[in-house]
Image (tube, rainbow, N blue to C red):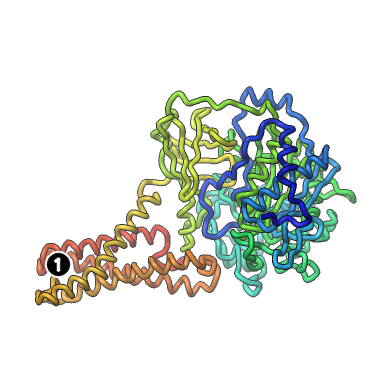
Amino acid sequence: MSYLPGGQTDGRERYRASRSLCRQVVESVSRPDPTRRSVLAGIGAAGATVAAPTVNAAQTARRQIQQQVNPLADRDAFEAFLDGVMETHLESHDIAGATVAVVDGDDEFSKGYGYADISAETPVDADETLFRIGSVSKLFTWTAAMQAVERGDLEIDEDVDATLEAVDLPETYDEPIRLDHLATHTPGFEERVRGTFVQNESELRPLAEMLRTEQPSRVRPPGEFAAYSNYGSALAGQLVAETAGSSFETIIEDGIFEPLSMERSTFAQPVPDDFADDLSKGYGADGRTDGEFEYVGIPPAGAMSATATDMASFVRAFLRDGATDDGRLLEAESVAEMHRRRFGHDERLNGIAFGFYEMSRDGVRVVGHGGDTELFHSLLFLLPEHDVGVFVSYNSVGGLEARPEFVDAFFEQYVADAASESEMSEPNGPPERADAITGTYRSNRIPYTTSEKFLGFPSTISVSVDDDGRLITHPLGGETTRWMEVEPLLFTEVDGTDRLAFREEDGEITHLFLDSTPVTAFERLSRRETPIVHLAVLAISLLVFLATVVGWPLAAGWRRYRGQAGAFEGTEPPLRYARWVAGATSGAFLVFAVAFAAILATDPTGLLLGNPLRFRLLLVVPLLGAIGTALTVGLAAHAWYERQWGLPARLHYTAVAIAGVAICWVLVYWNLLWYRM
């Protein structure tokens, strides 16, 4: 069924008719994130990707004949195209509603689709309906930072710690964190969930206080690798506020919203009363079940709500070199600085500008930013050389898959032409460094030092080579992707537009980079760090524990029934109590495993964002198991020395001791043996 109000039931047919006027359509497919979505969505860039193919002679020729990107040259055709795309997305991805704005030179188009409130049957209105835009908010933070640079309040190479007054950064490394490190997500902070989101309005605290109390550790020197950082962007907001002697929200209101006449945009949480009735609800995976208002604990990182037409005003200013109808948002030189590539993991892949990141594709330079909360999924991207900019936002979980499809459809319709077609030849053999590059890699955007580290467990990519010589990547819980080598250690996606590169240091492959995620690096894992090893250890250990807590009582009952002596009977202290110690140890680990899995399946947000006492109490259980493990190991050694038990009893008891040590090793790795925040 269609969620579209207004009788637009023929949108898909108009879409097909419009597409038939162009080259043969390659079916749009949702390109999944390189790693499975984590337990909590970040207000980050995940999924908002537009990958760029390898630059070669064919593409050089293509650029020479590339037609001007001009989607609004025929507004009726564009509306027909957009209606078809959005209706398809709303139906196929169970999305309640969406809003879109497109700027093309001096022309503008905006439109709402579906419902802002299903129960009230309130349609989305691009002029009136506010959407939560997630990390697209960061572009406003970085615009304010560049305005501060223009005023002379800040410098791009500013030592952040030397300037901040309300927040002290840990002096983990000699190199200072500069403003441009924050702008390129290279300050070296670990990921942190607690404090990024909060559960309700009562948990909101002043920005400076949140930045002090929920500060992530510095886990790498600044400037080495990008690891998307909500905290870093919020620090920039605090820096701008301190140097201006005002609040962050006031700076955005006076410096951006007012000059752009963005009268239906706000960073307030919840939104002001006069906006409340027009704020879209957010919906779950079924597109029907609405969720609560999502509170961002560090507002500069992603708290903004806005209409599509307001976002069009922001887009227009950046396409006009900072000019507005009433003056200037930024100088042209400042806009160029914000769009200039400042950092990249590999020169052959997309990189990061000042707040924006590159999303280039089909030989066309694209910069932009994605934004995700749990329920809302948004994207803003600019084609500066063509004076075209687009904003799109979905109010349902399904928007995470619909968003890359939207980009694919837009580029196929208005950017790609016959010259962009390239034939993918079969590889002559395996990649040059096949043995060196195969292995497992994990995203560096994870918690490293806290008990939130388990969130990084699914953020892995396994790399192998198939019989045809193609590189195969398989994210944990995701879909397999095939790649072909086009240059040493550079691969292009066989059935897509993404690219992948490896970094070699001192003859060893250390990292994997994806063109579609320039704000993240993937670190090569040792074998003992891989998910398959940890899962195997957990599975075997839990089976041993289960055999202990179930098998020992059953065996004792059976022997009692037959009038036989127990395997542990007749022993002297301390071995007389060994079975109880091992049983309690096994039970503790089993209880923790079941409870932890149940909480992750039902309420992971509550575990991480709620009262920390709940998490602390949960982690008392494996700590008791660890204490029991130490006693079990000692008693096992004593049993072998004294030989008071039969061989089967000693072997089983030793297995329990080994399983306890093994599971403690896994829990220590994931910071789950005691509470660390």
442 lies above or below 349: below
The residue at the point 67 percent across, 43 percent down is 407
Residue identified by numbered label 1: 639
Residue 55 visible? The answer is: yes
Say what amino acid the circle numbered 1 marks: Ala
State left or right for residue 168 relative to residue 552: right
- Quarter of the image containing the N terminus? bottom right
Position of residue 600 measured from the top left corner of the image (x, y, whole percent): 47, 64
In percent of the image, x 32 and y 69: which residue is there?
A: 625
Residue 422 lies in quadrant:
top right
- Across and down, in percent, residue 129 comes to 77, 60
For the image shown, how many numbered marks are present on the structure? 1
* Towards the viewer: 607 or 352: 607
- Tell me the SS state at disc 1: helix
Residue 520 in picture, x, y percent from top left: 56, 47
Left or right: 14 in relation to 401: right
Q: Quick check: 186 above or below 644?
A: above
Relative depth, front residue between 50 and 207: 50
Residue at (44, 67) in percent of width and height? 598
Q: Position of residue 261 (x, y in %)?
A: 85, 56
For disc 1, the neighbor class at 10 Å (few under 14, some 14 to 19, many from 20) is many
Is 100 or 330 nearer to us in this picture? 100
Q: Is residue 535 left or right of residue 73?
A: left
